[in-house]
Amino acid sequence: MNPNPNNPKTYIPFLSLACLSFIAGIISAAYINIGLFVVYVAALFVLLLLFYLHIRQKNSGYVILLIFFLIGLLRQMVFASPGKDDIHYFSGLKFKQVSLYGVVSSQIEENRFGKSFVFDVKSIRVGGLKSKVSGKVYARFNKRINLNYGDILTVEGRLRSIKNEGYFNKGLIRKGIMNVLSVGRRDWITIHEAHSFSIIRLASLAKENLKKRFQNIPVPAKDFLVAFILGDRSELDQDIYSVFKQTGVVHVLAISGLHIGIIIFILILFLKALRLKLKSRFIITIVLLAFYTFMTGLRPSVVRAVIMGAVFLLSFLVEREYHIYNSLALSAMIILFIWPWQVFDIGFQLSFISVLGIVFIGPKILSLFPAVKSRPLKFLKISSVVSFSAWIATAPLVAYYFGIVSIISIAANLFVIPLMPFILAGGFVYLISSFVAPVFIKWVSLSLEFMIDILIFIVVSFRNLPFSYFYIDKFGLWILFLYYALLVLLFNLFFKGLSK
């Protein structure tokens, strides 16, 4: 995504303001205890006011923004309110052993401590008593058993409520998960059957199949490719992961706009080789992108990038102008309407803030530089500005959550990002070859190992530079808001005068 140096001015469309109002409603509902009755009365009053302004033919923009605020407020309240038969009420009884029947409603996560999944519970059995329930629990186990999204299970274990403390626990509670089921080694997990057909289940099975295709590539190249292409970082070496975080290039390990842009390019090029018409190529690409989103676990950065990519392709199909702020706002509203808790997730915040930094700050900085005709110099100029814009937008968030500031992030990105298209393209060539021409995968594998070794060497070299990064103490949230307020003020007011 290249900033437009010819348009340094900032224009915020109405959809973006509506998105901000919607987000404000979600955040307000999470921190302010408001009854549903009050919200319904307020919504009725606002709708009547909107009708009155429409009859009088007066400006109703502010009222519409208030409606979006109430929608966000209501969506979060409904999402966070457990039903009368929610499993959470049973966790307070402190049963030593329970048996839960339900459906696996997430992909299976695996790390060095074991495996886990979200379990959509349908009934609970304690001793000889059985009762219908609803709600979700976070199940942890450490058994050699293959589970997939959509499996219908009976799981034994110890049920307990989650304490509202710590980043991980608070994240689960915001997702509407307030209980943990700890499955011991002697507890049973019984698979009854697979659930009815599901896109998510099909995508999960496809992901596991593709993951196995990388098993012939040595570590750490295999683990990097699984992270780059399938969005699974569970097997990445933690020391290497820390090095990427310390140098400020950890974003390349998460599937984002860069990855999706490369995938779109590869798909359209492949479909063009099949002599399909332009409209058919775009439609098929959008469908495949949607499936890829499910396959990578519906991560916020992937959903955001895919929606933006789909809107970009659709703008060509309907011959409408593409607007980056509108596509960002649309993708954010879709994600937050389905999963309102994502607004508190560091991945969601970094994903959107980085793109906003590029499209808001980038054009203003580029407008100060003279035009260059040399393609290498032009690439270097744009890459530097994009890296700086993303860094200045995300650095305070990274410092707030992780307590680290990377000084050499901009320089490291200039060397790392150009490698990514070749690694990603090579990864997809490897997967395609494993199906249609296995004889070539050995040579593709060697090329991928070589490129990933170079990538790791570059990142480690930057990390070893003196004062490349440093740690800071936790600071107040108000400092974060003050930073972004000053950033907007600087680039929207004073910087505009400097760019003339």
Image (cartoon, rainbow, N blue to C red):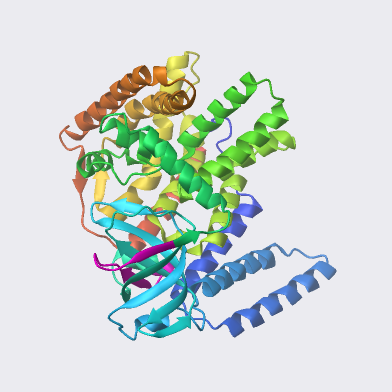
Tell whether 157 sits left or right of 297: left
Please tell me whether residue 185 belongs to the stretch shown in magenta: yes
* Residue at image point 40% right, 55% down: 147
Tell whether 156 sits left or right of 365: left
Q: Give percent across and percent down for residue 467.
A: 17, 38
* Front position in the image: 352 or 281: 281
Q: How many marks?
A: 0
| Rendered view: 178 above or below 199 | below
* Residue at image point 58% right, 55% down: 334
* Residue at image point 42% right, 78% down: 124
* Front position in the image: 325 or 90: 90
Residue 208: quarter of image: top left
| Rendered view: 489 above or below 384 | below
Q: Give the magenta part as a residue range.
A: 173-191
* Front position in the image: 101 or 398: 101
Q: Give percent across and percent down for residue 485.
A: 43, 55
Please tell me whether residue 334 belongs to the stretch shown in magenta: no
| Rendered view: 470 above or below 375 | below
Residue 238: quarter of image: top left
Tell whether 320 sits left or right of 86: right
Q: Give percent across and percent down for residue 463.
A: 20, 35
| Rendered view: 193 above or below 262 | below
